Amino acid sequence: MAARIDHLVTSGTFSLDGGTWDVDNNVWIVGNDDEAIVIDAAHDADAIFEALAGRTLRAIICTHAHNDHIDAAPALAARTGARIHLHPADLPLWKMTHPGTVPDADLADGQVLTIAGTDLTVLHTPGHAPGAVCLHAPDLGTVFTGDTLFQGGPGATGRSFSDFPTIVASIRDRLLTLPPETVVRTGHGDPTTIGAEAPHLDEWLKRGH
Protein backbone atom coordinates (compact mmCIF):
# COMPACT_ATOMS: atom_id res chain seq x y z
CA MET A 1 0.00 0.00 0.00
CA ALA A 2 1.42 3.37 -1.01
CA ALA A 3 2.26 5.98 1.59
CA ARG A 4 -0.16 8.79 2.29
CA ILE A 5 0.12 12.04 4.24
CA ASP A 6 -2.05 12.70 7.28
CA HIS A 7 -2.17 16.13 8.91
CA LEU A 8 -2.79 17.13 12.51
CA VAL A 9 -2.70 20.60 14.08
CA THR A 10 -1.69 20.87 17.72
CA SER A 11 -1.51 23.97 19.91
CA GLY A 12 0.89 25.10 22.60
CA THR A 13 3.65 27.63 23.14
CA PHE A 14 7.02 28.54 21.64
CA SER A 15 9.64 29.89 24.02
CA LEU A 16 13.09 31.31 23.27
CA ASP A 17 15.22 34.26 24.40
CA GLY A 18 12.98 34.95 27.38
CA GLY A 19 9.72 35.25 25.44
CA THR A 20 6.77 32.88 25.06
CA TRP A 21 4.14 32.88 22.30
CA ASP A 22 1.02 30.83 21.59
CA VAL A 23 1.42 28.76 18.41
CA ASP A 24 -0.41 26.21 16.28
CA ASN A 25 1.86 23.56 14.78
CA ASN A 26 1.46 21.22 11.84
CA VAL A 27 2.21 17.59 12.62
CA TRP A 28 2.71 15.44 9.52
CA ILE A 29 2.22 11.68 9.55
CA VAL A 30 3.57 9.78 6.53
CA GLY A 31 2.85 6.09 6.04
CA ASN A 32 0.20 3.53 5.22
CA ASP A 33 -2.33 1.55 7.26
CA ASP A 34 0.44 -0.47 8.92
CA GLU A 35 3.35 1.86 9.63
CA ALA A 36 4.20 5.56 9.73
CA ILE A 37 6.66 8.23 10.70
CA VAL A 38 5.81 11.48 12.49
CA ILE A 39 7.39 14.73 11.38
CA ASP A 40 7.56 17.15 14.34
CA ALA A 41 5.90 15.78 17.47
CA ALA A 42 4.43 19.05 18.68
CA HIS A 43 2.64 19.73 21.95
CA ASP A 44 0.23 16.80 22.30
CA ALA A 45 1.57 13.24 22.38
CA ASP A 46 -1.91 11.83 23.08
CA ALA A 47 -3.45 13.48 20.01
CA ILE A 48 -0.59 12.30 17.80
CA PHE A 49 -0.84 8.77 19.18
CA GLU A 50 -4.57 8.73 18.45
CA ALA A 51 -3.96 9.95 14.90
CA LEU A 52 -1.64 6.98 14.33
CA ALA A 53 -4.73 4.79 14.75
CA GLY A 54 -2.83 1.68 15.75
CA ARG A 55 -0.08 1.96 13.15
CA THR A 56 3.49 1.10 14.10
CA LEU A 57 5.46 4.32 14.52
CA ARG A 58 8.87 3.77 12.92
CA ALA A 59 10.47 7.13 13.68
CA ILE A 60 9.93 10.64 15.04
CA ILE A 61 11.67 13.12 12.74
CA CYS A 62 12.45 16.60 14.08
CA THR A 63 12.83 19.29 11.43
CA HIS A 64 14.60 21.36 14.11
CA ALA A 65 14.74 21.60 17.89
CA HIS A 66 12.70 24.65 18.82
CA ASN A 67 10.60 23.57 21.76
CA ASP A 68 7.26 23.77 19.93
CA HIS A 69 8.44 21.12 17.45
CA ILE A 70 9.94 18.67 19.95
CA ASP A 71 8.09 19.11 23.24
CA ALA A 72 5.95 15.96 22.79
CA ALA A 73 8.69 13.83 21.19
CA PRO A 74 9.97 12.02 24.30
CA ALA A 75 6.46 11.14 25.50
CA LEU A 76 5.48 9.86 22.06
CA ALA A 77 8.70 7.86 21.83
CA ALA A 78 8.12 6.32 25.26
CA ARG A 79 4.60 5.32 24.28
CA THR A 80 5.49 3.83 20.89
CA GLY A 81 9.11 2.74 21.09
CA ALA A 82 9.97 4.94 18.10
CA ARG A 83 13.38 6.56 17.86
CA ILE A 84 13.78 10.34 17.77
CA HIS A 85 15.90 11.71 14.90
CA LEU A 86 17.50 15.19 14.92
CA HIS A 87 20.36 16.90 13.11
CA PRO A 88 23.23 17.15 15.62
CA ALA A 89 23.74 20.88 15.00
CA ASP A 90 20.48 21.45 16.90
CA LEU A 91 21.56 19.65 20.08
CA PRO A 92 22.03 22.93 22.01
CA LEU A 93 18.40 23.83 21.28
CA TRP A 94 17.21 20.32 22.15
CA LYS A 95 18.89 20.51 25.56
CA MET A 96 17.04 23.73 26.37
CA THR A 97 13.77 21.79 26.25
CA HIS A 98 14.91 18.31 27.30
CA PRO A 99 18.03 18.78 29.46
CA GLY A 100 19.96 15.66 30.33
CA THR A 101 18.67 13.77 27.28
CA VAL A 102 19.73 13.36 23.67
CA PRO A 103 17.81 12.17 20.60
CA ASP A 104 18.24 8.56 19.55
CA ALA A 105 19.68 9.12 16.08
CA ASP A 106 21.36 11.83 13.99
CA LEU A 107 19.97 13.16 10.74
CA ALA A 108 22.48 13.88 7.97
CA ASP A 109 22.23 15.77 4.71
CA GLY A 110 21.43 13.35 1.89
CA GLN A 111 20.22 10.62 4.22
CA VAL A 112 17.25 8.67 2.85
CA LEU A 113 14.47 7.56 5.18
CA THR A 114 12.02 5.00 3.84
CA ILE A 115 8.49 4.42 5.10
CA ALA A 116 5.78 2.35 3.41
CA GLY A 117 8.00 2.04 0.34
CA THR A 118 8.38 5.81 0.03
CA ASP A 119 11.74 7.59 0.26
CA LEU A 120 12.22 10.89 2.05
CA THR A 121 15.57 12.60 1.50
CA VAL A 122 16.99 14.77 4.27
CA LEU A 123 18.02 18.26 3.11
CA HIS A 124 20.07 20.22 5.66
CA THR A 125 18.67 23.76 5.46
CA PRO A 126 20.19 25.85 8.25
CA GLY A 127 19.12 29.41 8.96
CA HIS A 128 16.03 29.22 11.14
CA ALA A 129 18.07 26.89 13.32
CA PRO A 130 21.58 25.45 12.79
CA GLY A 131 20.30 21.90 12.37
CA ALA A 132 17.11 22.65 10.48
CA VAL A 133 16.23 20.06 7.85
CA CYS A 134 13.59 19.57 5.19
CA LEU A 135 12.36 16.19 3.96
CA HIS A 136 11.81 15.76 0.22
CA ALA A 137 9.43 12.98 -0.85
CA PRO A 138 9.44 13.08 -4.68
CA ASP A 139 7.02 10.14 -4.99
CA LEU A 140 4.50 12.17 -2.99
CA GLY A 141 5.30 15.41 -4.82
CA THR A 142 6.03 17.19 -1.57
CA VAL A 143 8.68 18.63 0.70
CA PHE A 144 8.21 19.02 4.44
CA THR A 145 9.96 22.27 5.32
CA GLY A 146 9.46 22.72 9.04
CA ASP A 147 10.09 26.42 9.70
CA THR A 148 12.52 26.94 6.79
CA LEU A 149 10.02 27.99 4.11
CA PHE A 150 6.43 29.16 4.51
CA GLN A 151 3.72 30.50 2.26
CA GLY A 152 5.09 33.99 1.70
CA GLY A 153 8.73 33.56 2.61
CA PRO A 154 11.48 32.24 4.86
CA GLY A 155 11.04 31.29 8.47
CA ALA A 156 11.86 33.77 11.21
CA THR A 157 15.51 34.59 11.91
CA GLY A 158 15.21 37.22 14.62
CA ARG A 159 16.17 35.01 17.56
CA SER A 160 19.17 33.10 18.85
CA PHE A 161 20.78 30.43 16.66
CA SER A 162 19.26 31.90 13.47
CA ASP A 163 20.61 33.84 10.49
CA PHE A 164 18.76 35.43 7.57
CA PRO A 165 21.44 35.14 4.83
CA THR A 166 21.88 31.49 5.77
CA ILE A 167 18.19 30.64 5.51
CA VAL A 168 17.87 32.42 2.15
CA ALA A 169 20.87 30.49 0.84
CA SER A 170 19.34 27.24 2.08
CA ILE A 171 16.05 27.99 0.34
CA ARG A 172 17.76 29.12 -2.89
CA ASP A 173 20.18 26.20 -3.11
CA ARG A 174 18.22 23.31 -1.61
CA LEU A 175 14.51 24.04 -2.07
CA LEU A 176 13.98 26.28 -5.09
CA THR A 177 15.87 23.68 -7.16
CA LEU A 178 13.01 21.21 -6.60
CA PRO A 179 10.27 20.87 -9.26
CA PRO A 180 7.98 23.93 -9.18
CA GLU A 181 4.88 21.80 -8.64
CA THR A 182 6.32 20.38 -5.40
CA VAL A 183 3.90 21.00 -2.53
CA VAL A 184 5.52 22.70 0.47
CA ARG A 185 4.10 21.37 3.73
CA THR A 186 5.16 23.74 6.46
CA GLY A 187 5.59 23.68 10.22
CA HIS A 188 2.84 26.27 10.73
CA GLY A 189 0.05 27.54 8.50
CA ASP A 190 -1.09 26.63 5.02
CA PRO A 191 0.82 24.73 2.32
CA THR A 192 2.27 26.41 -0.75
CA THR A 193 4.36 25.25 -3.72
CA ILE A 194 7.95 25.74 -4.76
CA GLY A 195 6.74 27.48 -7.90
CA ALA A 196 4.64 29.96 -5.92
CA GLU A 197 7.55 30.96 -3.68
CA ALA A 198 10.44 30.98 -6.19
CA PRO A 199 9.60 34.37 -7.79
CA HIS A 200 10.09 36.11 -4.43
CA LEU A 201 13.76 35.15 -3.97
CA ASP A 202 15.10 38.55 -5.08
CA GLU A 203 12.71 40.31 -2.70
CA TRP A 204 14.01 38.18 0.21
CA LEU A 205 17.60 38.90 -0.73
CA LYS A 206 16.93 42.65 -0.66
CA ARG A 207 15.36 42.38 2.80
CA GLY A 208 18.81 41.82 4.22
CA HIS A 209 18.01 40.36 7.63
Image (cartoon, helix red, strand yellow):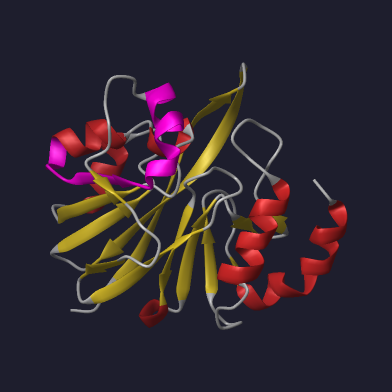
Could you tell me if residue 11 is visible in this image? no
The spot of residue 27 in percent (x, y) is: 41, 49
Residue 158: image quadrant is top right
Taking 153 as reference, is 17 left or right?
left
Could you tell me if residue 24 is visible in this image? yes
127 is higher (above) or lower (below) than 71: below
Q: Residue at x 49, y 43 (%)?
A: 25
Q: Residue at x 61, y 70 (%)?
A: 173
28 is higher (above) or lower (below) than 31: above
Looking at the image, the residue that sits furthest to the right is 206
Looking at the image, the residue that sits furthest to the top is 18
Q: Residue at x 66, y 32 (%)?
A: 159
Front residue (pair 130, 41): 130
145 is higher (above) or lower (below) than 85: below
Q: Main secondary structure of the magenta part?
A: helix
Residue 17: image quadrant is top right
Residues in magenta, as a range: 79-97
The spot of residue 33 in percent (x, y) is: 17, 66
Residue 179 is inside the magenta segment: no
Taking 198 as reference, is 47 left or right?
left
The spot of residue 85 in percent (x, y) is: 29, 47
The spot of residue 180 in percent (x, y) is: 61, 82
